[in-house]
Image: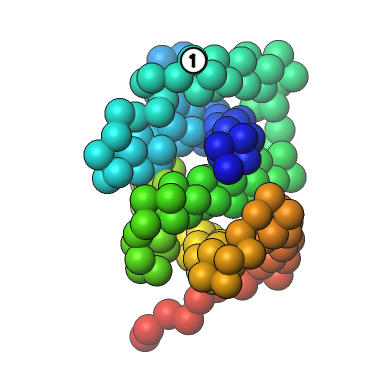
């Protein structure tokens, strides 16, 4: 389902471009820093994913990823999204980050399924695609990666991967079932964020 992959990829790039842009503004990065942080967030996970799949990075061979990134940053600047207080709790940031997380989880899982990866491989590739860019960005700006401390964040990528792998196992993976998984995962992430759910911690 290449069309669905393209749609999910564009949604993910737009959403993560916004969240990367807002994080860069919060950390007082300059214009180049903002562009790098946004690009790493939006494209980094996909680049790592394609490297694992031994294919040319999609972000480097297709026109739309870079154009989508730049256009989104310009729109975010024009509408002054960076003026919003308390970025991490801001509705725009939470929504964009959640949508990006789910969209990239789906693209990673779909590509893993098409590559005939096993159940474990589908989960890992989905997870890396979803959080790889954000982790790279966080390391660059010298902060603990969000996936390690945030409320029920990386768990969403795992849940999406398990759901899609299960649908494929029963041969009912299609646009409608993927859309249902995406919608349910976004709602779950927003509920988890609102209620401050966390995975158990040792000690």
Tell whether 55 sits left or right of 9. Answer: left
Q: Tag 1's secondary structure? A: loop
Q: Which residue is at a point 42% across and 63% down the rendered structure image?
A: 123
Which is nearer the eye, 177 or 149?
177
Which is nearer the eye, 16 or 90?
16
Can you identify the residue that label 1 sits on?
Answer: 63
Task: Please state the horizontal and vertical placement of residue 167, each as a whole percent of the image.
Answer: 58, 67
Task: Please state the horizontal and vertical placement of residue 76, each as a whole percent of the image.
Answer: 66, 22
Does residue 113 appear in this view? yes
Task: Please state the horizontal and vertical placement of residue 92, each as a whole percent of the image.
Answer: 71, 39
Picture quarter containing residue 196? bottom right
Q: Which residue is at a point 35% across and 66% down the rendered structure image?
A: 118
Location of the C terminus by quadrant is bottom left
Picture quarter containing residue 156? bottom right
Which is nearer the eye, 182 or 156?
182
Q: How is the image coloured?
A: rainbow
Picture quarter containing residue 138? top left
Tell whether 180 sits left or right of 30. Answer: right
Q: Which residue is at a point 45% across and 19% down the rendered structure image?
A: 62
């Amino acid at each position: 389902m290449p069309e669905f992959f393209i749609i999910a990829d564009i949604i993910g790039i737009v959403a993560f471009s916004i969240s990367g842009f807002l994080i860069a503004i919060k950390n007082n990065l300059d214009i180049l820093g903002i562009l790098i942080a946004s690009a790493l967030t939006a494209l980094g996970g996909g680049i790592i994913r394609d490297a694992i799949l031994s294919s040319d990075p999609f972000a480097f061979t297709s026109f739309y990823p870079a154009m989508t990134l730049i256009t989104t940053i310009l729109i975010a600047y024009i509408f002054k999204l960076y003026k919003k207080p308390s970025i991490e709790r801001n509705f725009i940031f939470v929504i964009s980050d959640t949508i990006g997380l789910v969209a990239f989880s789906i693209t990673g899982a779909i590509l893993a399924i098409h590559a005939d990866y096993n159940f474990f491989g589908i989960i890992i590739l989905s997870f890396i695609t979803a959080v790889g860019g954000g982790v790279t960005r966080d390391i660059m700006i010298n902060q603990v990666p969000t996936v390690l401390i945030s409320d029920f964040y990386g768990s969403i990528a795992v849940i999406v991967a398990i759901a899609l792998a299960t649908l494929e196992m029963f041969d009912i993976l299609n646009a409608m079932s993927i859309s249902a998984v995406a919608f349910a995962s976004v709602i779950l992430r927003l509920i988890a964020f609102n209620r401050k759910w966390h995975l158990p911690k040792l000690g």
